[in-house]
Amino acid sequence: MTKVKPSGSGMAPRVVVQSRRSNLGGWIGLPAGVLLLVVVGTLLSDKFLSISNLTNVLISMSIVGLIVVGMTFVFISRGLADLSVPATVGIGGILVLGLQPSLGSLIAGIVGVLAASVAGLVNGVLIGWFKVNPVIATLAVGSIVLGAAQAFVGGVIVYGTDSETQDLINSRILGGIPVIVIIFLTVALLGHILLSRTAIGRYTYAVGSNPSASEASAAPVKFTRAFAFLLTGALGGFAGVILGLSLQTARPIMGIGYEFDAITAVVVGGVSLLGGVGSIPRAMGGLLFVQLLTNIMVLQGVPSPVQGIAKGAMIAGAVALDVYLRRRGGAQ
Amino acid sequence: MALTMTGIGKSFPGVRALSEVDLEVAAGEVHAIVGENGAGKSTLMKILAGVYQPDAGSIHIDGVKVSLQNPLDAKHLGIRMVYQELNLVPDLSVAENIALGRIPKKGGFVDRAQMHSDAQRVLSELQTKISPSTTLGDLTVSQQQLVEIAKAYASDPKIIVLDEPTSSLSEHETQALFQVIRRMSAGGISVIYISHRLREVMDIADVVTVIRDGQRIDTQKIEGVTVEKMISLMVGRQLAEVFPKRTVPIGETILEVRNVCVPGSCEDINFTVRSGEIVGLAGLVGAGRTEVAQAIFGLKSYSRGKVFVNGLPTRITSPRKGIKAGIAYVPEDRKNDGIIPSQSIRNNISLAVLPSLQRLGFIRGRREKELAQAKAIELNVSPPIIDRLVSTLSGGNQQKVVLAKWLAAKPAVLILDEPTRGVDVGAKADIHTIIGQLAAQGVGVLMISSELPEILAVSDRIYVLHEGRIIEEISRADASEQRVMHAATGGDSS
């Protein structure tokens, strides 16, 4: 006597194929890809597998890696992407160096992170509560913050004077591991714990996978959406502070390109733009893949326009593949 | 015969939706199809529309055998569907909506004059007073409905299928629609009319076909039937399954709903649920059952009235507050409102109680695992592997996971909205057993169901909703399918 409402609600088993397939691609594809790059890199250049080269790869991962952590939350919560990253990185870098003479590096750094967090909070409120499209909201907020940063410094470079902190950030400890890499790995680990072991992490997946079921299960949907952007704003500011301290120069436009690199890494890591699927380790795998590929191209002397083309193709390809796999398995 | 469908059969995985259904519709005939929710009416019409392919049987139009591989085939043969949900563009004019898909052109540009006069002709043939230049969004819902029908009519159809066309119309508007239907039928168009409103069927139809459990039960001239006859044909089946309700002592009132009103859906709702009691909420789809349930749980806001839980007035404005007050709600639409498909069984079960599983901000992994494991076994989830993705389970097992999520919250009142829809027989029996056990533990259960045998077998008391009002309360002893159906279709209590 069981009857199916043919209008669709009864046809659940179709979903089966979807998740298995998209998981499979994510788990096996990425380590295999990284391994392939290592082999190719080693064959092409004898410099590739040297400690100094690999350390360089790690350092170049570190700043963008901080942003990747936040961007992973944005993706999994189905928040599309945070395009205000260049602005939050910029405001972090400018504030830490601009306020350094009066407040000292530590307090100035905290102010920088807080200012960027406010930008992230505004993003979050617009997206979570006012339901503004994330792309538009973060572009608008980014433009405002960048404008404010430029007004603050008059549009030119800010130079820092704290060479002590600069040396500390750029130093190596524990037998040669750069401090900047340790900072990055610590943040990535904390982000992983937050996403996998806490309620807000669970809600992030739930909201991204099925917002209306999350709502019906009393998950704080608006707050969860907002949180991803708050976190990305704070981490963008933090990345700007670290970058500023390490270079002791900052410009309003210093963050441009980080949003793109972070999105590339997350997407290549198999974190779905459609929400609900992904993890920090996978995003980090994606970041490693992109960084190794870039490194190989640099070692081979591939001109930078070609590198740009390769990265763009990777984003488009990875997203198209993800959408294709989900469509094929999911709703027809 | 304008249309002859012979021996139509259709199965979905695990379910026989239609078997050996015959349907004959003459030119210019208004042919009503009636049956309970899920009897197979929609499936039959979707086959006629080319949306589904039948597993068996044949379709003839004007005596010629046809094959409807897709909706376009059906369209070319002059078959038009008007569904409950309107397929119109609110920002365009009435004329543009009517012409959509066949816009007249002159030299590559839209021929506005032609489009306008075509629409005018159609609208006046149907004797409506709607102006073709009005923006569609400015019309009332019933006028939009007429535009939708005019759009179908304008394409010179042979057969028009109207699926529950009066569900959002007032009495007066319904009469206006009937005028239009009579005009069309006088013009030789066959009208297939699907409705739950049997009185309206008596009014408009020439012939009625009753479908039950995927089979055609009877086809009669309308003069030969009464509303009571139709009801008994619709529900008069043998009870193939018995859902035992264990007798448990019924305690104090734990949920009391007083004069609750949800704007646009229901008015002045009053009912009570007592500890250990299973209360059925019956009514047709669209009667406001789900809205009442969602308002009590905090998913929908209500404008007036009071809800008391354990005698205390409670203002529930969000699901979070609903859970705090001791209420749980298992939604009707499992796929959209129930499961988190990309997550494991474990994470789905713990979702509503995460705050209580935390220590120092972290989820206590072992506690969560034990909880999920216990609930999965208690509810007989198969396979009981809690790290499996929920999306890999069958519909029935997904439903058990949703139920497990709410049992984890230890509710005092459990609201179930169509808990066994689209679920296989085994899972259905499991779910009924669990509902009975919960009642035995003192939980008050409010169950919404469109399946009369289910609601009759499981409920201690039944409230029947009709058009947003509770029109009857029936005790278990007095309940029968006829009586519930009679009230649900708007009959006076007798």
Image (cartoon, rainbow, N blue to C red):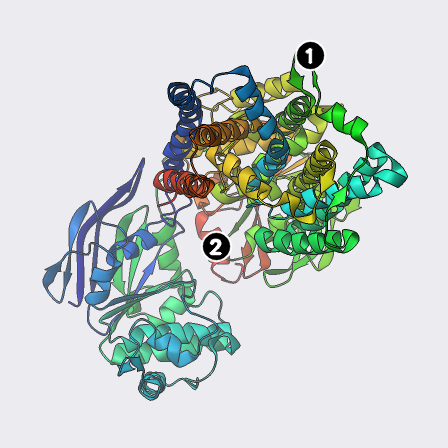
Q: Is residue B134 visible?
A: yes
The residue singled out by tag 2 in the image is B285
Element carrying mark 1: loop
Q: Nearer the viewer, mark 1 or mark 2?
A: 1
Q: Is residue B361 visible?
A: no
B1 relative to B214, above or below = below
Q: Residue at x 81, y 43 (%)?
A: A98
Frontmost residue, A51 versus A74: A51
Q: Amino acid at mark 2?
A: Val
Can you give x and y, in whole percent of width and height, for residue A215 in the image? 61, 44
Residue in view at x 50 percent, y 57 percent: B286
Quarter of the figure with the N terminus of chain A: top left
How far from the left and from the top, in percent, is residue B462?
Answer: 56, 46
Q: Report how far apart the C-alphas of labels 1 and 2 lie in the structure.
A: 69 Å
Residue B243: % across, % down:
46, 33
Q: Position of residue A170 (x, y in %)?
A: 70, 25
